[in-house]
Amino acid sequence: MNKKKKRAGTARYNKWGYIFLLPFVIVYVIFQLIPLIDTIYNSFFENYRSGLKQIGPNFVGFANYLKLFQTGDLPTYFANTMIMWVMGFVPQIVISLILAYWFSDPSLRLKGQRFFKTVIYLPNLIMAAAFAMLFFTLFSDSGPINSILVGAGILKEPYSFFSHVGSTRGLVAFMNFIMWFGNTTILLMAGMMGIDTSLYEAAQVDGATSSQVFWKITLPLLKPILLYVVITSLIGGLQMFDVPQILTGGTGDPNRASMTMIMYLNNHLYSKNYGLAGALSVILFIITGLLSLLVYRMIGGTGDDSYGKPAKSVRKAKRR
Amino acid sequence: MSKKRLVSAAMAAAFAASLITGCGSSGGGTTTTTAAAGQTTTKAAQTTTKAAEKTTTKAAASGSEGKVLNIQAWNEEFKSRMEDHYPGYEKVDATTGKIGDVTVKWTITPSKDNAYQNQLDKVLPDNEKASADDKVDIFLMEADYALKYVNADVTMSLKDLGISDSDISDQYKYTQDIVKDKSGNLKGLAWQACSAGLIYNRAAAKEVLGSDDPATVQEAVKDWSAFSDTAGKLKEAGYNITATTNDTYRVYSNNVKTPWVKDGKLTVDDNIKKWVDDSKALVDAGETGTQDLWSDDWSKGFYPDGKVFCYFGPAWLINFSMKGDDTSSIAGQGGWGFCAGPQSFYWGGTWIAAAAGTDNPTLVKDIMLKMTTDKSILKDISVKDADCVNSKSVNAELAKETIDPVAPAEGDDGKMKPGNITYILGGQNPYKELSEGAEKVDMSNISDYDQGCNEEFQKAMKNYFDGNASYDDALTQFKKAVNEKYPDVQAD
């Protein structure tokens, strides 16, 4: 009797499990899976418009992929994207780690934490397009930044920020940094607060310096969150679009040095070139997958070992 | 406890990692949603050919006509012209009006980011199949992309509407060249003639050229070599001859001998190449900038401190864009002058076209004729709305009249209103120059691809002017951009 009841119970719970999963599965299939398959399907067709003339869809096999590689621009735009991402991500992760460490360190007793946490998150609430527009105005040839620099005697004549590769890329990276470091700080902080304080106490008792505590305890235990931050940021970086698009008026100038992969894709949508844009999407999808895997291997591969060690020491500490 | 926490942290991380898979695919997802929409339009485009054939017969036999007149536009301009000048038009509310028992419905889509053309591309190919009240009857076009619609079957020829050549003989030829299809059928009419010229800063002209008389200034800018000599003199006095290199672009590009695309191949005309060479020389000498038109850096020359000698533009630029409502601007003080400039050109203008499949051909014909050929209406538009109208005789009349300058003043709504054109031009009546200019404009060398080519060429050449690329590199970049916009054009 008892056994039967139990089995019936399990079955019932299973059913509810599936029902709760259903909304996600339905939304996922309609808005993610079908478009994904459709994109791949579309990438094998010649399908575009020239003026009002519709050309295709004609099946062309891998011609779209071939064309993308033949023009030879793809590596350039991929490099642009990655350079701008790295330029923004390195300072972002460093600053975020420092801030998160300070915020989560109870011995520092920082005042006004809530206020600062809100403030550093604020730039993320502004629309990227509006933020880019703002920067465009600030850094234009006769904009306030140039007026200040010339007025203060630092520059002799206005520096055109958007005519130089370094400054344009730098501004894009800087904006991405400003927009995302608050978000990263909060994620890392959540991870750090999850670390048992008794570990820190034990380290203190053992006479560890604060840098030792950071490198030997905080960082290894933070790996899962760090991995998440790096991978999401990488994917976000690969899909970088709105900031450089608005900042350069869609041109990716100077000389297409700030043209990202998605901006390139967007260029093909003017002629409603779904074949080429589809092929580009598929390539981007593959690159994203490969890079994520690489990051996962690099950071996460040894994650389990180091993850287990502190856990053991926790047990030891408790036993003690 | 702590172990549980660690486990839950790991769970959270794992859950987050699983989300990433979803994120990754969304990048591809966006494109495909639109792809599906594109396929529907394909089918629509195939039916258009048949649809257009029917239209001809339908227009001829206009018995009972539709009760709703649908008009597609990108701004309020034509709507306000209709409200003010079309006899019998009653305004109902912001997007509807009435002509007799026909309701006029306005669909206004701004042209920013190609939105207006996307809207046209969506509705026009399907127009024949649309229900009577939804059929587009009139749509407006700009010159830069007019051929795209004129050369397609979505536009009705004027002949089919019953408008003959003699009806429109008073119009400038260039306004008709722009809307002629490949077989020479006229498919649209404009009420404006946006011939343009050189608008110069009188104070600068006095200082550098010794006189602000239009004839003297014209002599100093009569061709491109005189223009660049004058630029050198202006430089010494601290003036830039133009605000940016793009100011002169239209002047050169309107005077080309070959269209951008000929037999499917992209060609750069000699006059366009001349623009590149002349502009590069000006930029290198520090006599002009490389900013975009309409940017703040461009329009700072509207004020005396901007130190810009001239702008190139038609009447509407003078009236509406040069900050005439601000008394501290040059326009607000009546400090501009007008002369023809090195080469004649035009800028802007709105063309009225009848959509294939319209169920109101008689009314459409009447609107087109009244708004673009009726002399009393056109004269009225000239005087009240400061348009330069598409009528040789009206402009000749205006050139003879003395138009009293009206200074900027506060309107009924408390906003400043700019002064009229003679005030802004320091008492000068520009209609003679405008009219002569319009006669000279030759737009026989346009192609379907002009808008994209003109935009991309200026963007690409900015890199050359800024010293970031050689001419060949900039040209390669231009070709790439053209290939992206028009995959069927052979760029190399």
Image (cartoon, grey):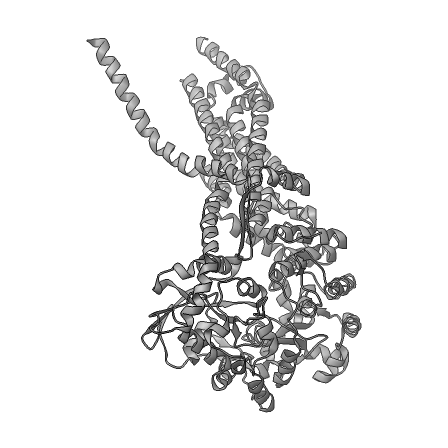
Quarter of the image with the N terminus of chain A is: top left
Is B3 positioned to the left or the right of A131 in the image? left
Q: Is residue A257 left or right of residue A310?
A: right
Residue lying at 39% horizontally and 73% vertically, measured from the top left: B61
Relative to the observer, which residue lies in front, A94 or B243? B243
On the image, the x and y values in percent for residue B260 come to 67, 61
- Going 52% across and 32% down the picture, which residue do you hit? A100
- Observer-nearest of B378 and B301: B378
Residue depicted at 55% across the width and 57% down the height: A51
Q: Is residue B162 visible?
A: yes
- Residue A11: image quadrant is top left
Which of the 4 image quadrants contains residue A238? Answer: top right
Instruction: Provide residue A170's location: percent of width, then percent of height.
Output: 65, 45
Residue in the foreground of this view, choosing between B77 and A145: B77
Residue B112 image position (x, y, % from top left): 52, 59
Residue A72 in view, yes or no: no
Count of numbered circles in the view: 0
Task: Name the residue furthest bottom.
Answer: B401
Residue lying farthest to the left in this orientation: A1
Residue B84 image offset from top left, x and y in percent: 42, 79
Is B438 rendered above or below residue B136? Answer: below
